[in-house]
Amino acid sequence: MMLPKKLSCFLLVCICLFSCIALRAQKKDSINKSLVKDSSKLDFVAKMQAFAKRSSKKSADEFDADKATIAQIKTFDEIQRTMQKAKIYVNGKLDTTDTKNELKKIEEDFAVAGDGIFTDRGSSQTFRNLTATSNILSQLLNKVNARKLKLDTRQQELNNFRYQLDSLLSVPALFKFPADSVTLMKYLQKIKVIAYETSPIDTSLKMASNNIQNLLNQVNMTAFKLESSLEEIESYQKDMAGQTYKREFGNLWKSPGNYRPFEEILYFSKTKGLLTLTFYAGNNTGKLILLVLLIATSFIYLRSLKNIYLENNLLKTDFDGQLVLRYPLLSAMLIIISLFQFFFVSPPFILNVIFWSISCICLSIIFRKYISKYWMRVWLIMVVVFLIAALGNLILQASRIERWGMLITSILGVIVGLITILKGHREELREKWIVWSIAFMALLELISTLANLFGRYNLAKTLFIGGFLNVVIAILFLWTVRLINEGLFLAFNVYSGQDKKLFYLNFERVGKRAPLLFYILLAVGWAILLGRNFPAFDYLLKPFQNFFTQERTLGDYTFSINNLVLFIAIMSIAVIVSKIVSFFASDGHLPDNKENKNERQGIGSWLLLVRISILCIGLFLAVAAAGIPVDRITIVLGALGVGIGFGLQTLVNNLVSGLIIAFEKPVNVGDIVDVDGQGGKMKSIGFRSSVISTWDGADVVMPNGDLLNAHLINWSLGGNRKRISILIGIAYDADLEKCRQLLTEILNNDQRISKNPGPVVQFEQFSNSSIDLRIYFWTKHIGDTSATRSDLIIAIVAAFKANGIAIPFPQQDIHLHHPDQQ
C-alpha cells in the first residue's frame, strides 16, 4: 500500500482534468447557436419536456454533488482522526527499546541457566541442575511468549491503521469533483494538504511495522531456542529417570576425570537458585500474599484464644495439651506454612528450603523446655544435618569437595540414627511414629553412602537429601497435626454452646489423639514432598496428572476431572468457612462467665447474611474456576423452577423465610423467645430451619416458615426485661399501710428489680378470708425471673412474721343446727 503515491497520482489527474476544462471553456461555442436555432423549431410541448429533463438532471446532479460533498467532508474528518490516532500510537506504545532490553536480559539468563548443561558440562548431568535449568527456561519461555503476543497485537494494530487509511482514501465519493471551478480548486488544495499530512504518517507506520517484524523474528528465534533447549533437558531427565542406578563418576577414592573450581560451581548455583526463586515468586505473588494473610488471621485467632484462657485462669504452666497457645505467632506460622506449601505447584527447591527452615525454627522454639533434653538434642541435630544436606542440594553441579561432604554427613546421619534407635528414651516420645522415620533415615543414608563411594552420584544425592528430609518433614507434620488437634479441642472447650458434630469430628477424642484422617493426609503429604527429590517421580505422577487434566466431552459440554475437583474443593471450603463462622461467631465463650451472660451477641443478627454471602462467593468462584458455561447454569435454574412449581414450594418457602428473618431480624441468635408455647433461647438460624434450645434442655428444630408465621414472642427485643406480679392475701385486721411500706422496702432492696419503672403495690379486693394485694415489678434480665420471684416470697413471709402480719388461709365455719329431739 503506497498511500502518498496514490494521493499524488490522484492529485495529478485532477489538475489535468481541471486544465482541460479551463481550456475548453476558452474556445468559441459553435454548437450553441445551432442548438438554439434547432430548438426554436420545436413546439411548445417539446420545449417543456426538454426543460423538465434538464431540470431533473440538474437537480439530480446537484443532489449527487451535495451527497458527495458531505461524504468527502466526513471522509476527510475520519482520515484526520485516524492519522492522529496512528501518530499517538506510534509515538507512545511502540516500546521497541524495552523489548530489545528484555531479549538481551533473556539471553543473559539463558547463558546462566545453561551452565553445566550446554556449557561447562563436566562428565555427567545432575538431576538438580536439570530441574533448576528447566524451571528457569520455562519462565523465560513464558516471558518470550508474552512478549510475542504483545508484538503480534501491535503489528496487527499497525496494519489496521494502514488498512483504515487506505480504505478511506479509496472511498468513491472522493472521486466526484465539483462542477464549479473555484470549488474544484479548493477541493484539489485540500487533497494536496491531506497527501502532505499522510505521507509522514504512512512512512512512520511502515518503519514501525518493519521494526516490529524484526523484533518478532528475534523473539521467534529466541522462543525456538528455548523450546529446543527444554526438549533437550527433558530428554536428559527421561534418560536419568530410566537409569537411576547408572554410574556417573569414578569411585570416590580415585582422582577426578574432570575438574572445575568449586568457587565457580558455587557462584553459578547461587545465581541459578536466586534466579529461579525470583521468577517463581513473581509468578506467585498472590499466593505469597495469601500465605501472609492466613498466618496473620491464625495468629489473631490463637492469641484471642490464649487471652480467653488467661482471663479465666485455664492456662496450664507446663502447656500440656495447650502447646498451640504457648507462642501463637510461631504456632500460626508452623501450621499455615506446613499446609499451604502444597498450594504451590512445582516450587523451586530453594523456596521449599525457606519454608522448611522457618518451620524448623518455629518448632524448635515451641519445643524449648517442653520436650525432654534428650529428644531436644536429637531434634536439633536432625535440623542441623538437614540444613547441611539442603544447602548441599542447592549445589547444582558435582564436585569432589561436595561428594566428600555428602559422605561425611551421611555417615553422621547413620550413626545418629542408630544411636537414637538403640539408646531408647522412647517412653519420653510424645509421637511414637518418629522412631520409624529415624530408622528409615538411617537406611537411606547408608545406601547413599555406598552409592556415593561407587560413583552413583545422582542416586546418592537423592537419597542423601531424602533421608534427612524424611525425618524433618515427618516431625513437622506430626506436630502440625497435634497443634491443629489442640486448637480444635481448646476452641471447643470455650465455645461450648455449639453442636459437637458441627465439624464432623469426635471432640471427645480431640486433644488425646488426632483423627485417622489427619494422619492419612500427613502420610500423603510426606510422600509427595519426599518423592519430588527423585527423578522418576514426575514420570510416575504423569498418568495421574493426565487423568485429571484430560478433557472429556459430555454432549456439548467439555470438562476435566481437575475442574470438577476444583469446583467441589472451592464449594467445600466455602461450606467449611461458613460453618466456622457459625461456630465461633454465633456463640459466646465460657457461658458460665457472668460478664458474658448478659452480653448481647451483635454479630448474630448478621450471621445468616454472612454465611449466605460466603456461599454465594464460593459458588461464583467455583463456577469461574471450573469454567462452567453460563447457559448450562440457566438450564439448571430452569429445571429447578419446574421442580419448585411441582413439589418444592415448602422448601422454597422456608428458604425465603430464612432470608426475610435475616434481613428484617424479628429474632436473633441468643434471643429469648416463646413460640407456640415453646419457650427457650435461639440457638441458630439456618437457611431452612432454626433451632430453639428450650429451658428443659431439648433442641426444637422449627422450619423458618413456621417460625415466621407463628405468634412469636421475643423477650430480647424489649431489652430482656419481664414484668412479674405476685398475689398476696393478708388478714382483715392487718395494718395495710405498714404492709405497703414493708413490701416497697423489700422490692427496692433487691438489685435484680428495675427502679425505672419502679415496683408497684396495689390493693385489689376483699376476698372471703383476706384482703388481696398484688405487687408488680420488672426484672432487669428475664433470666432472673424465677430466682427473683422465689427470693421475694421468702423475704415477704419473713418480714410479715417479724411484724405480726398474718397471711390467712381460706377457711369456712360450719354451724350444725340440731332441732329439739322429741
Image: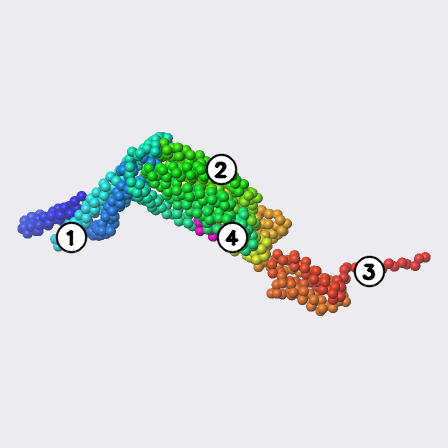
Q: Residue at x 21, y 42 (%)?
A: 214
> Tag 3 or tag 2, which sits nearer the N-term?
2
Rendering quarter of residue 716: bottom right
Dot 4, crowdedness within 10 Å: few (<14), some or many (≥20)? many
Q: Which element type, helix, strand or loop, lies under badge 3?
A: loop
Residue 700 on the magenta segment: no
Q: Residue at x 70, y 62 (%)?
A: 795
In space, the residues marked 4 and 2 are separated at their CA atoms by 37 Å
The mark found on residue 306 in the picture is 4
Q: Which residue is mark 2?
A: 421
The mark found on residue 813 in the picture is 3
In space, the residues marked 4 and 3 are separated at their CA atoms by 72 Å
> Tag 3 or tag 4, which sits nearer the N-term?
4
> Tag 4 or tag 1, which sits nearer the N-term?
1
Q: Which residue is mark 1?
A: 193
Quadrant containing the N terminus in the rendered view: top left
- Which contiguous range is marked in magenta? 294-307
